[in-house]
Image: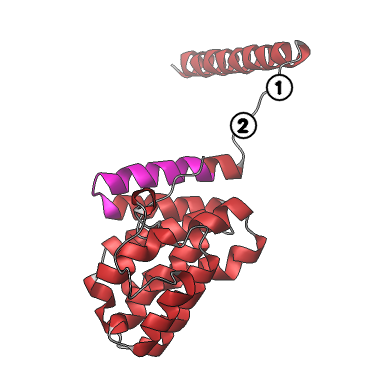
């Protein structure tokens, strides 16, 4: 019986070696034909996890979306698109501290991010933090954050209708600083309040998940 067992092991080992040789021949053949065997780099794998996270979030599977975002950040911890999207997921999970930490990470890393990513995300991060600090009753900090959000916005008009109608910003609208700030960007505010060209009535970039193109 021992001899038979040894033979079987040797036979299996031989087949395994043959399999490795076949794989090596195929690999060398591809390379010799000028083809390159490319494995996804960490950035591409991070993007794949991000896309999966966005999809899961759109399906309401926030805990799973968070896991996908965390895997993406392990691969690319300096990508502000990931930090922003994870902050949005935390927002939908009702975790304000983690949400705010995500926006602050976006702000901290913004200087080394691409211009496109900054234009998409930096202003929205400041804007989303306005609601968080207002929930703590900090109106002064809310105005400071709002000023930064508007100053960095690629198009301030995307925020206009939120600013004049969102219930979450009511504490700002009763403050005299609100009119001053609004007139800096919309000189007609208070005279033609609520009137902007139809083409500018677009949803703000805030509170949305952003895919990497």
Is label 1 in a helix, a strand or a loop? Answer: loop
Indicate the quadrant where residue 138 lies.
Answer: bottom left
What residue appears at the point 40 percent right and 58 percent down from the top-left corner? 158
Image coordinates for residue 152, horizontal then vertical, percent: 54, 66
Q: Residues within 10 Å of mark 2 (few under 14, many from 20)?
A: few
The residue pinned by badge 2 equals 39
Helix, strand or loop status at disc 2: loop
**Closer to the camera in the image, 76 or 92:** 92
Task: Please determine whether, in this image, residue 58 is positioned above or below residue 105.
Answer: above
Furthest toward the front, the residue is 191
Locate the N terminus and report the quarter of the image it occupies. top left
At 52% from the left edge and 16% from the top edge, which residue is drawn? 12
Question: Which residue in the structure is indicated by mark 1?
Answer: 36
Mark 1 and mark 2: span between their CA atoms?
10 Å
Q: Is residue 60 magenta?
A: yes
Does the magenta-highlighted stretch encompass residue 29? Answer: no
Tag 1 and tag 2, C-beta contact below 8 Å: no
76 sits left or right of 200 in the view: right
In the rendered image, residue 92, in percent from the top left (x then y), is placed at: 27, 61
Residue at 51 percent across and 15 percent down: it is 3
The residue closer to the viewer here, 28 or 64, is 64
Task: Work out whether residue 170 or residue 141 is closer to the camera in this orientation and state it.
Answer: 170
Prevailing secondary structure class for the magenta stretch in the rendered image: helix
Which region shows up in magenta?
Answer: 46-62
Asked whether the viewer can see residue 68, the reply is yes
- Please tell me the numbered disc located at residue 106: none
Where residue 21 appears, as percent x and y from the top left, is 66, 14
């Amino acid at each position: 019986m021992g001899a038979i067992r040894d033979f079987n092991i040797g036979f299996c080992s031989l087949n395994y070696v043959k399999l490795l040789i076949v794989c090596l021949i195929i690999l060398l053949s591809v390379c010799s034909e000028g083809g390159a065997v490319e494995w996804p780099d960490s950035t591409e794998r991070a993007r794949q996890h991000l896309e999966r996270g966005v999809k899961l979030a759109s399906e309401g599977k926030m805990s799973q979306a968070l896991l996908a975002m965390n895997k993406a950040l392990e691969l690319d911890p300096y990508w502000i698109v990931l930090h922003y999207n994870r902050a949005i997921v935390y927002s939908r999970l009702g975790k304000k501290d983690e949400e705010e930490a995500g926006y602050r990470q976006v702000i901290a890393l913004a200087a080394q991010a691409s211009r496109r990513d900054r234009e998409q995300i930096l202003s929205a991060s400041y804007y989303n933090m306005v609601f968080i600090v207002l929930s703590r009753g900090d109106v002064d900090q809310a105005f400071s954050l709002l000023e930064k959000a508007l100053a960095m916005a690629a198009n301030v008009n995307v925020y206009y209708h939120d600013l004049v109608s969102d219930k979450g910003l009511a504490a700002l609208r009763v403050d005299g600083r609100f009119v001053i700030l609004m007139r800096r960007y919309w000189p007609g505010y208070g005279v033609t309040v609520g009137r902007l060209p139809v083409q500018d009535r677009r949803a703000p970039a805030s509170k949305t998940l952003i895919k990497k193109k």
